[in-house]
Image (tube, grey):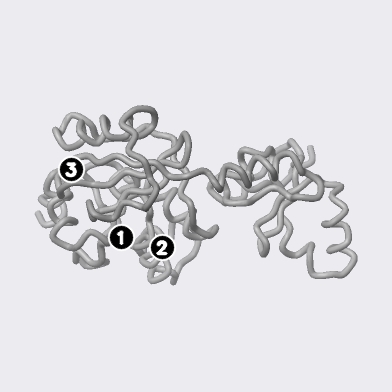
Amino acid sequence: MKQYTLIGADNVAFTTTMPGTLGGHRADRIYGTLGCPGAARAIGRGGYVANRVFFADEPTAIAAGYRPCATCLPDAYRTWKEHRAMPLTHTTVASPIGELVLLADGDALCEIRFDIADIPPDSPRVDDGVLGEAARQLREYHDGVRTTFDLPLRPRFGGAFERRVWAHVAAIPHGTTTTYGEIAAALDAPGSARAVGAANGRNPLPLVVPCHRVIGARGALTGYAGGLDSKRRLLEHEGALLAMTG
């Protein structure tokens, strides 16, 4: 039976017996129909096929960080463009490391900021919808009654490698830690521990995507956008610091 290689929402390739319905290009991060005239012209010029990938459907392509082709998918492109122009909304919530700013892009959480003063201009406060649910779950985390989050997430930036790192970090269990090197090995990218660290540092959704659970090879609490003291407090809150040092 013929096998096809597709790209998943986490940017990882997988094999399936079902062919892809959409083609994408790694360099320009655009996906389109398999018969897209723009892609056909690019293939004719050469150099396009080496960077071409395939997706099962549009939600998967978008989740992987690709945008619709304006030529062959004009309606999807228009919807994507309107969504990207959607203004942010915000709320605030207490956490074990202080008050946080939560930002939403429509119906998904897109960013968490540590500085309570760092609220985007023209960002109205909204305390219901996805922001209300995110605040509720973070309060439960603060109170020690929640160990996992179940929220729609849509980071507003991030390349393919960064999103692969964030997807792996999101799966690190509560109360445990891992290292940059271990993540690199799990992503079949040995030797890229430094790149993993950089991607981890750019995580736009701290706590929910628990980048504080990633530590140095020798147990050092290296690097955290919220500061090393905050990283230590979060690990103590989860009981991981004792497991790490004991």
* 26 left or right of 191 in image: right
Label of residue 95 in the image: 3
* 231 left or right of 90 in image: left
* 223 left or right of 46 in image: left
Give the amino acid at mark 3: Ser
Q: Nearer the viewer, residue 9 or 142?
A: 142
Q: Residue at x 14, y 33 (%)?
A: 143
Label of residue 179 in the image: 1
Image quadrant for the N terminus? top right
Image height check: is 120 above or below 222? above
Give the amino acid at mark 1: Thr
State which tag comes first along the sequence, 1 or 3: 3
How many neighbours does mark 1 have within 10 angstroms: few (below 14), some (14-19), or many (20 or more)?
A: some
| Coordinates of residue 209 in the picture (x, y in percent) | 35, 47
Image height check: is 140 above or below 39? above
| Among the 4 quarters of the image, the one containing residue 3 | top right
| Among the 4 quarters of the image, the one containing residue 63 | top right
